[in-house]
Amino acid sequence: MIRISGIFGFHSGNRIMSEVTQEDGALELISVLYVDDEEDLLDISKIFLERSGEFHVDIVNSAVTALQSDKILSYDAIISDYMMPEMDGIAFLKSVRTLSRDMPFILFTGRGREEVVIEAINNGADFYLQKGGNPKAQFAELMHKIRQVVRRRQAEKDLSEQRIFNDAIFTSVPGLLYIYDEDGHLIRWNKNNESLTGFTTEELQGKHFLDWFEDPADKEQIKKAVEQTFREGSGSAQANISTKDGRKIPHFLTAVRVEIGDKKYFTGIGIDISPLKEAEKTIQERDEQYRRFARNAPDMIYRYSITEGRFLFVNPASSVLTGYLPEDFYQDPVLFDRIIHPSWKEVLDEKKRELFEGHSPIIFEYQIIDKDGKNHWLNQRKVLVRDEAGKPVAIEGIITDISSIKQADEELRRSEQRFDAVTRNAGSWIWEIDTEGIYRYSNPAVFDILGYHPDEIVGKMHFLDTFDPSIRDTVAELSLTIFRERENFKNFENLNRHKDGSIVLLSTCGSPVYNEKGEFSGYWGVDEDITEQVKTRDALKQANQKLSMLASVTRHDILNKIAVIKGYLAVVSMEFETPELMEYVRMMKSATASIQSQIEFTRTYQNLGTEEPVWINLQSILPVSQVPDEIIMSIHLPDVAVFADQMIEKVFFNLLDNSTRHGKNVTELVVSGREQQDGFLVTWEDNGVGIPEEEKNLIFERGYGKNTGLGLFLAREILSLTEAVITETGEPGKGARFELLFSKGNYRIL
């Protein structure tokens, strides 16, 4: 029984903003926006208000700026001056009221005219406070007004929310909510009584509770429940409520006796149980779906009764996994124990004991021998079912054939063993680092190269730690660029320190590594010890330098002797004018000139390949300044650098010499380039007479040609040092076309 002073009365305490405490125990401050064009007054007002510890004040020197702020409606109160440029306090107040009807607004101004006060109040200002007088008293009054207006707004808000809350409770109760008097007539109800039954407010007023039911059995049951409610305090029943349109809806109805003064009522709720009826039907359908799922599942599903010692359910998948039908398991309760592989029997017996003790893992793997004698790997997930008393009554499980997975695992294991064998026996140091540069893998070759065992560096050392201090800073800067750009790199020569302190020169290649999500996860690469190789290379370079010096001295001496020969031939020509002798002199001069040309060529050729190839910007080495005035040169090259011998500049000078010397009537040169599948192609074209088909390959041979026969030969040799290729593909009679192909890795688009 319930005794109350009024029907459905509610009450809650008011909230005072300045006394609200946050969840973390800190005081929640009243947030205030103060707008005034006087900067000094803004600052002193903020100081006075915030000194109290109750307020947080934001200050703005323009009403227009304040209105542009997204935070304007988040404040607990707004204070504004009246006289301000751009927009005065009254206009500001009007704008605020268009945004919020209840935002607390205090006009704080030096203007005391009555018409200003009236206009402020008429436009919704909560208070009007005049500046001036004692600052302490003035700001105390201002703080009091702020507290007052904030409390008032909160109280109004709480009252409105309480009304909404009370109405929401009554209207949002699911199903029917009703109150009947002692005579059984309806006196109050929620909207569901109207929407569900179709009766209007007028039709429901005073309706007797028995009028809802047509079935005599329902009427009798409801009558007894109401009598029980008035006698014992509460009652309930199930019955079909009749709607205005004749539908009958099953409901579960409750009633509780309520006494108000000397009057008695009963109140309760009616819940539409149609969904429950539908749910029962749905459950039956789902049970059938689960049975169908179990019958068709590829995994073996079973339930074994511990108390009865037999299988209660085995689905048809048992025949695929074991070769035995469900009926075989029903007839032979220990059949599954008999097909377990002998090597696993003791393990599974132990698992069964652990299951009853509550220690066995839910998932485990083992092998069986099927009806045909074949081995199968199985994955079993099972649970122990207990009754309400905690006694084990059954085992339920799902068994999956994982033979194919085990086979794949075995293949993976063998592959990993092969990889391990390769990395262990490889002379190269194979490594992998994470995104921070820490080693996460190293093969044993690192010991032979740097003296470290893999476990000394994996997870412990940064890749910069082994670099020689003289290059460490440079390498660190370069590595940051590589990491940022996710670039591949190769043949990076670098100095390292062996564990014993000796110098080791390595050549490093690396590529970025990405995880299964495509995210960058580090680098892997290979290091080759090239210490001895570089020593040999340096020795060879030194030998070449000595040979070059010897060739230079020899060439100098030969050229001096040629000068002497030319001098004597000149004397003979002056002293003797016999035609036969002059012919011999001419032939001797020609032979001497040829010898001189060959000797001069050795000056250029001796430097070929003596310096390391470098990256050279192509546009920077084109002989633009050497092009004759009568020839127009067009360049259509992207900004590209090629990895080539430092003498590559002579290639383009020789191409220009070929066009001007042998093209005869050349007036136009075009140099272009493009990236293609097999590398970067540079073309040199002129509009001269071209090169006959039968000479296209011969022109690159040493000594072939109308001049020295060495220019294009030298061009081919220079390019071949870095695997670049030159060919002539022009059309005879329409001009020469030379194609220079730089292979992948030997060019960069800048």
Image (cartoon, rainbow, N blue to C red):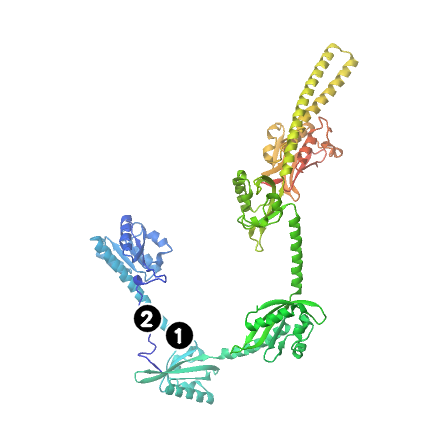
What kind of residue is marked 1?
A: Thr
Residue occupied by mark 2: 12
User: Is the N terminus in the top left, top right, bottom left or bottom right quadrant?
Assistant: bottom left
Give left or right: position of 239 versus 737.
left
Farthest right residue in view:
580
Residue at 62% across, 71% down: 349
Foreground mark, 2 or 1?
2
What kind of residue is marked 2?
A: Ser
Would you identify the image quadrant in which residue 397 lies?
A: bottom right
Q: Is residue 471 above or below residue 10?
A: above
- Between 377 and 136, the one lying in front of the other is 377
- Between 58 and 688, the one lying in front of the other is 58
Distance between the alpha carbons at the discs numbered 2 and 1 = 19 Å
Q: Which mark is first along the chain, 1 or 2? A: 2
Residue at 52% across, 42% down: 477
Give left or right: position of 331 versus 515.
right
Instruction: Determine the secondary structure under disc 2.
Output: loop
- Between 702 and 609, the one lying in front of the other is 609
Farthest front residue in view:
500
Inspect this view and state whether residue 243 appears: no
Would you identify the image quadrant in which residue 356 lies?
A: bottom right
- Between 339 and 343, the one lying in front of the other is 343
Farthest left residue in view:
133
> Looking at the rendered structure, which numbered label has been put on residue 171?
1
Instruction: Determine the secondary structure under disc 1.
Output: helix
Give left or right: position of 92 versus 425.
left
Measured as percent of width and height from the top left, residue 661 is found at 68, 27
